[in-house]
Amino acid sequence: MIKQNLREELLLSETIEKGMKGEENLSAQVTVFHKNAEIVSDAEIEQSLKNLVSESLSENTIKTYRGALRRLGAFMDIEEKAGVDLLLRKLDDSSLARYVAVLETKGKAPATAQMTIAAISYIAKLRAEKSPAGRLTDAAMRGFRRRCSDRGRGQARGITWTQSEKIVASVLNNPDSLTGIRDAALISLMSDAMLRISEAASLLVSDIVEEADGSGRINIRRSKTDQEGRGTVLYLGYPTMARIRTWMEISKVKSGALFRRVSRGNLKTSCVGETSLSPLSIRRILKTRAEEVGIDGVSGHSLRVGAAQSMAVGGATLVDMQIAGRWKSAQMPARYARYQLAERNAVARLRYGR
């Protein structure tokens, strides 16, 4: 009996001791947490908040907003250094509507005015204030759209799959050109995956995977319609993957940016840069290479537009095109391929058996 009581006391003592050590460890962890928390200054928190807010929009959208707000500030006689707070205080529904009228008079497109309204509304929302755009601004915009619906850049000229192959064949006419090998891989990839210019510019070698059958897969880490970076995997055909492989082997690009600046010269004398091609450089490459085979009026969207048109001719549905091009709705592929889709409407099918 005495031994039993002694054993129980020893077990209870050990349990209490372990509990006390656990509390000490927990207390130590809490102390460390408080010390770490104290290290984070208000300035660091404020900067982190600014970074998070800026990440909520794409880089291109931020640049567009800044330009729109700068021009709106000039209209309101507000110096750029005064900041947007003063602009928000001085701006109201009437003055914003007058600015819409100014843009219409200057021959601008309705999209320009709408972008300005979106920019000022976004800034107001961040400051928990009401947007100055009201009924008068809305009415002015409705009239602007009806009166000037034909203004703007219009639809980009499409580069179809057949045309992209023609461009690539022309580019590869000079087998001793490293820029040609790079451009052939770039154009093939953008056509297969229907990439936006910004997506092509941000590609890394690690984003490309070659499959056993020679085809490829490309991982799009972030895009215009995927700002949170969930990622998308897209298909690359065998010819495209072969051109990418040739570019990587000859350029000796094994990691980092996939498509890079190349100096003038041939395969032996050309030097490959360390950083990726800029979106502006890629746009110029597309325009130049298309013009070499007689295709004018090309923009950064031309390969996406042309791919949608090629799919429409091949019998793809709007949903097929929407998924392939990663559009939020079927409205854009329907617009891009409206001429090709007309051949498949009810009249063409039912009356003429198309």
Image (spheres, rainbow, N blue to C red):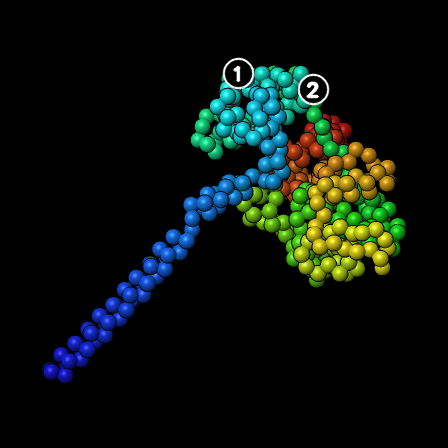
Residue ID for mark 1: 94
* Left or right, residue 344 beside residue 88: right
Where is residue 161 drawn, in percent x and y? 77, 43
Question: Label 1, label 2: how many angstroms apart (C-alpha)?
Answer: 20 Å
Image coordinates of residue 151 in percent, x first then y, are 70, 22
In front of the other: 261 or 298? 261
Q: Residue drawn 24% across and 71% down?
A: 17
The residue under the point 51% across, 31% down is: 123
**Residue 211's quadrant in the figure?**
bottom right
Could one spot residue 89 in this view of the protein? yes
Q: Is residue 334 left or right of residue 3?
A: right
Contact, CB < 8 Å: mark 1 with mark 2?
no
Amino acid of disc 2: Gly
Rendered view: 286 above or below 143: below
Residue 174 placement, left or right of 116: right
For the point 56% across and 24% down, which residue is it?
A: 78
Image: 311 above or below 73: below
Q: Secondary structure at mark 1?
A: helix
Task: Using the rendered image of the protein, determine whether residue 245 is visible from the camera's viewpoint.
Answer: no
Which dot marks residue 264? none
Q: Is residue 323 above or below residue 342?
A: below
Residue 120's quadrant in the figure? top right
Please state, as top left, top right, bottom left or bottom right, where the C terminus lies in the image. Answer: top right
The foreground one among 91 and 333 is 91
State left or right for residue 174 relative to residue 327. right
x and y percentages locating residue 50 in the rendered image: 50, 41
Disc 1 residue type? Answer: Ser
Q: Secondary structure at mark 2?
A: loop
Q: Residues within 10 Å of mark 2 (few under 14, many from 20)?
A: few
Q: Which residue is mark 2?
A: 107
Which callout, 1 or 2, points at the residue further toward the start of the chain?
A: 1
